[in-house]
Amino acid sequence: MKKIFAVLLISLLSACASKSTQPTAEVEDKSIGSSSRSTEGSPTTGAVPNLNPLTDPNSVLSKRSVYFDFDSYVVKDEYRSLVQAHAQYLRDNGNARVLLQGNADERGSREYNLALGQRRADAVRNAMTLSGARESQIESVSLGEEKPRGLGHDEASWAENRRTDIRYQGE
Amino acid sequence: MQIRLPEFPPFAVVLFLWLISAPLHAALDIEIFGGGATQIPIAIVPFAAEEKLNQSITQVVAADLQRSGLFRMIEPGGLAPHELIEVVYSEWINRGAGALVIGTTTLLPGGQVALRVRLLDVAKQVQLAAYTETVPTGQLRAAAHRIADIIYEKLTGDIGVFSTRIAYVVKEGKRYALQVADADGFNAQPVIEYTEPIISPAWSPDGKQLAYVSFENKKPVVYVQTLATRTRKAVANFKGSNSAPAWSPDGKRLAVVLSLMGGSQIFLINVDGGGLQRLSQSSGIDTEPSFSPNGQSIIFTSDRGGSPQIYRMQITGRASGTAERLTFEGSYNVSPHYSQDGKSFTFIHRNGDRFNVAIQDLATRQVQLLTDSKFDESPSFAPNGRIILYATEVRGRGILSAVSSDGKTRQQLSTQAGDVREPAWGPLPRLQ
């Protein structure tokens, strides 16, 4: 992982060499709460550019959740570009490994929901391998209804919990 | 993530267990709803010198019998015979008792208690059973459960399940604890505690091990843990998800659900983790396997027909691999569990927006809904097939509940705190 990061750092640094830290300044301006406090308090964290596209909020790769309709495991069109971007990243970074965690809402059997979450993770995996990621880079698993992000017992929470999360190794 | 598999010396383990279980002691209170149509009127006279013990026996016996829904307690009303010679049957006939329980307790040196108990038929004026046992004072509850079993068996002709144990998961805040308790909810002991979810506990047929699914490693993995030694092994930890363990009746193998070869499919695996063998072959979801008592077939949940329904598949012999659909009513039937006689299975049926416990007869295909609550889950039979234990929700909190297999008696097992779910009723204790 360290190696990948180093490679990434070098390639990004060389790519942005002429642009200097311009894009970073923009990032900082946009981020919430990045007022005078952050520059005063910790100048290092405030000034270091975020060069990891996986965590750069301006990069599509920082978006990690694919949402699904009720009782469905079809990757919707609105998430195609996101899934393709991650597939592209995996293709470009042969050492990168990703864990896809499928989730389901709380209604019904825990084990059946675990299987539903698995289908949602598998759907994202299949879309990624179709876009060039290797099968060996991806593990698709399910958390079923066990790790809800939405804690309510209403449609808004249920919709939030019908999703697959993309987690890179080491995260 | 905190893993609590202590590697302490035995004394420390005992202390640790005691510290954990102390606040949970007597955590499950039981409330009874309804009652059977015909109840046996029984009088239980407090045993001689029982008040000198640190644990009442007759109260535990009475609570066990009442919980079955098959008994009605008759107050002794001032009568206190302890020996056969002191019994005047006419007095008990006048009080409406059909059966009478009397007995004595004698505190012996070394913390032992000698128990002598008699069960009498009031109408026939004969002794139905006599029981003597000497137990350490710390095991008086267990002795009381054995006495309740004897009374239950003599008077109903059925197997008593008061000496069995149940397993379940308690979620309190961010902590998950897999616990084992006596069938009356007392004497709760933690098996394992995590800050990550635990689901699907399943008892080995000998009651010595529990299989369960833990999410401590960012994904579901099937473990088997030996209760006495607290040692455990990851039996199914393949790429993808590993879940839904079910023991074969001989205790040698587990049916598990793996996504190893795509989808969620049912496999057989030896308890030591070897001998992996695929059982189901479908492009859909196959999960929640439950073995028939003879080990020749499994019932399971599958969405191969478009909605989740229950299927049966032979796993031995010529017809193995072909699945037969068993449920046809409604669009959501899940979580099947075979009864011990193999004649029926219990499952969860979605009824509008409600999820209820149901039972289906395998021969007649007749379905009976046993509950009318909102969110019932994980039904499993008591070892005598007369009671079904399940998880339900009351005022947004998970609790355990039990319903008689004829639907007539319901009991709630509630805890003081936390969400209780994923119950599994353990097997009958082995007669050594």
Image (spheres, coloured by chain):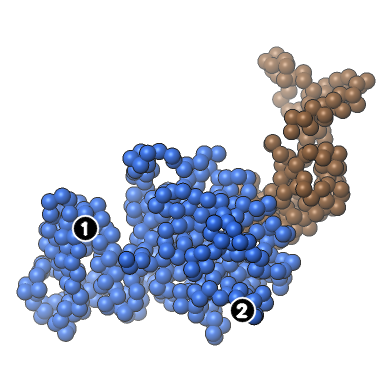
Label 1: state its secondary structure: strand
Hue of chain A?
A: brown
The blue-coloured chain is labelled B
Image quarter hosting the C terminus of chain B? bottom left
Residue furthest to the left in view is: B85
| CB-based contact (under 8 Å), mark 1 and mark 2 | no
Q: Choose mark 1 or mark 2, whichever is in front.
A: 2
Q: Left of B91 or right of it: where is B67?
A: right
Q: Does B22 appear above or below B311?
A: above
Label 2: state its secondary structure: loop
Residue furthest to the front in view is: B275
Label 1: chain letter: B
Which amino acid does the dot numbered 2 rest on?
A: Gly
**Percent of width and height locating residue B388:** 45, 69
**Percent of width and height locating residue A147:** 61, 48
Task: Say which residue appears at 79% left-offset and 50% top-offset.
Answer: A135
* Residue holding disc 2: B317
A144, A67: nearer the viewer: A144
Which amino acid does the dot numbered 1 rest on?
A: Val
Task: Say which residue appears at 47% left-offset and 57% top-offset.
Answer: B210
How far is the residue under mark 1 from the one under mark 2?
48 Å
Q: Does A38 appear above or below B98?
A: above
Q: Left of A6 or right of it: where is A148?
A: left
**Percent of width and height locating residue B391:** 49, 61
**Percent of width and height locating residue A42:** 69, 16
B406, B202: nearer the viewer: B202
* Residue holding disc 1: B135
